[in-house]
Image (cartoon, grey):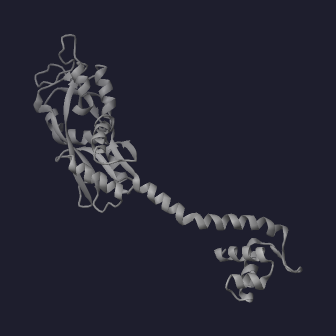
Amino acid sequence: MNFIWLEDFLALAQTGHFSRAAEDRCSSQPAFSRRIRSLEEWIGTDLVDRSSQPARLTAAGEWFKGVAENLVGQIARLPDEAKQVAETQAVTLRMASTHGLSFVFLPRWLRQIESSFAMERVELLSDVLSRCEILMQQGKVHFVLTHAHPRAPSALDTDNYGTLKIGSDELMAVSRPNDRGQPLHALAADNKSPTSVLGYTDESGLGRIFEAVLGKRLKAVPTQVVFKAHLASVLRTMALDGRGLAWLPKTLVEEDLAAGRLVSACQGEWNVPLDIRLYREKNMTGQAPLALWSAAESKR
């Protein structure tokens, strides 16, 4: 069906005369009549009673008149509606963040950014790093927030993406304390029995970093992995329950450390310094995303 047919039909319904409607539509009458006939053939029934003067709409024509008016009205509104959608998208910042950073760091960082950049809407997707990377590669988010380490490069560490260090963190071994305030699960090379360790699954971004930096070293220490998860928050819960030693971001457990609910489980050389990085597409457009990036650069 041709959209022009709808406008032709509505012009005919208004005037009741093929010649006058054709004139209103800046068309010859034979061409106008052919288009009305094509519309009827597409619908599958007569819409106009040509035996009367002026021409009258059939019952099907009366029904279709309402349908055509609705369709023409909807199509006429499309440009404005599309503009509204585009404007909404332009100010809605879509961000993917790894779980560990979305709990504590991200809310604090956003409060800092808001002092120089007025954010209207932020859509946060919290997931494992591999999924966050995919969302960025598919163009479904403006930014990815994640921990980073040079020995465990992200899939976003390419020329297609820009990166900005917006904070620092530390992956530290922690344990629930015993009655004397000492770690219930301590890491030491001279342990006579294996230390229970809470580890990360392969899909975890922190797990990638841990394996790249400490994986080989840890094999020289008597340990036993008793539980694995891809979320640092899950490992934190297990550590608080005394199930084992876990390497967790300091930003996630700093309140637990201050309150004595968790304590350091080994010497500092087993801790891993981390960058907190914000990624974006190199060719990112949109006033709101670019403004946030600029504000992030100024707050470093």
Task: Give residue 182's quadrant in the image.
Answer: top left
Which residue is painted at 84% across and 67% down in the image? 59
| Total numbered labels placed on residues in the image | 0
Task: Give residue 159's quadrant in the image.
Answer: bottom left
Asked whether, in this view, residue 55 is left or right of residue 296, the answer is right
Res. 155 in view:
no
Q: Nearer the viewer, residue 123 or 72?
A: 72
Q: Tell me residue 39's x, y (percent).
A: 73, 76
Task: Give residue 218's quadrant in the image.
Answer: top left
Q: Nearer the viewer, residue 265 or 24?
A: 24
Asked whether, in this view, residue 127 is left or right of residue 155, the answer is right
Asked whether, in this view, residue 189 is left or right of residue 157, the answer is left
Q: Tell me residue 155's x, y (percent).
A: 27, 53
Q: Nearer the viewer, residue 144 or 6?
A: 6
> Is the N terminus in the top left, top right, bottom left or bottom right quadrant?
bottom right
Q: Which residue is farthest top?
A: 179
